[in-house]
Image (spheres, rainbow, N blue to C red):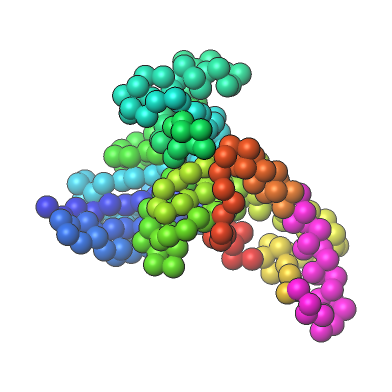
Amino acid sequence: MAHRIIGLDIGERTIKAAVVDKALRKTTLTAVEREDIAIPGDSEAIQAALAKILSRTRTSGDDVVMTGLSTAPCIHRVLRFPFSEPAAIAESVSFELESHIPLNIDDLIVDHIAVGTTADDQTAVLAVGAPETVVARRLNMLRAASAEPRVLSLATLSYATLLGNLPTLTEGRSLVVDAGELSTELVIVEDGEVKWARSMSIGAAAIREDFAAKFDTETIQGDLLQTHALLLPPGVPPSQPSEQVLHAATVDALQPWLSELRISMAAARRDGVKAPKQIVLTGGMAGM
């Protein structure tokens, strides 16, 4: 029997929705919607934007709503087990995760996914602990809009499915960089499976602030980073002095973000994850 799925991406500045009609042998993307949040980060403004986008996408109470949590407020570790049985891993993962974190495991909702086999033939598992307060806040927001979610997962895990449906990215090892407003989500996908995930506590807001601070912006309205950021290709000289100034300001503003990215990739190598062959940049900052 066919049914409609509404996938929600709830950010700090925008809410995006993808509507999918799913039948027995066919899945079709039928609509993509976006709603800007009037006051970025404000809970009431997010609630209002959510109600608006659902009013345009939902046609009946039978529509299935799916959404995800950001990696940022969650605890996540790559754990290793000397066995591969799913039931044994499920029984052990909370206990093993607790020994790696400074929090009370009882305050977290824990889930996991197997991400491969290590060089010494152990099972690598990505374990995630979401604070109960964070999960409750997201569920209450959706319930207030009469949109009880069928699935509430880690948002970054959806990229494995997305890349699996893109012919040029189905195979191989890709790093997805989702640059949001307050944080940047990283996930390494190999042959359609998530191998590693991490969140960087720096996003477009910090880069925008650093970029704007380099200029006299008292009389300028709007997002200066979005309208004036400039990266010259290697070996291409600026055509005018202003291009060199904007290029230098953009590179300088990006340095803290790039430094965090390099540190994160070093962490992935320590976790035994091979370097990605390609990078997929998405999120609000990707349009820059």
The residue positioned 41% from the left and 19% from the top of the image is 92
Q: Position of residue 199 (x, y in %)?
A: 59, 41
Q: Position of residue 244 (x, y in %)?
A: 84, 73
Q: Nearer the viewer, residue 120 or 92?
A: 120
Q: Nearer the viewer, residue 279 or 103?
A: 279
The residue positioned 41% from the left and 29% from the top of the image is 111
The residue positioned 46% from the left and 31% from the top of the image is 122
Q: Is residue 74 magenta?
A: no
Q: Is residue 86 above or below residue 52?
A: above
Q: Is residue 157 above or below residue 100?
A: below
Q: Position of residue 279 (x, y in %)?
A: 57, 59
Q: In this view, which residue lies farthest toward the left?
A: 1
Residue 34: quadrant of the picture: bottom left
Say whether residue 198 is visible.
Answer: no
Label tally: 0
Q: In this view, which residue lies farthest toward the bottom?
A: 239
Q: Is residue 74 left or right of residue 217?
A: left
Q: Is residue 254 magenta?
A: yes
Say whether residue 170 is visible.
Answer: yes
Q: Nearer the viewer, residue 196 or 60?
A: 196
Residue 234: quadrant of the picture: bottom right
Please report the bounds of the magenta region as a residue range.
234-256
Q: Is residue 51 left or right of residue 124?
A: left
Q: Is residue 13 left or right of residue 19?
A: right
Q: Quadrant of the C terminus?
A: bottom right
Magenta span: chief secondary structure: helix
The residue positioned 47% from the left and 22% from the top of the image is 108
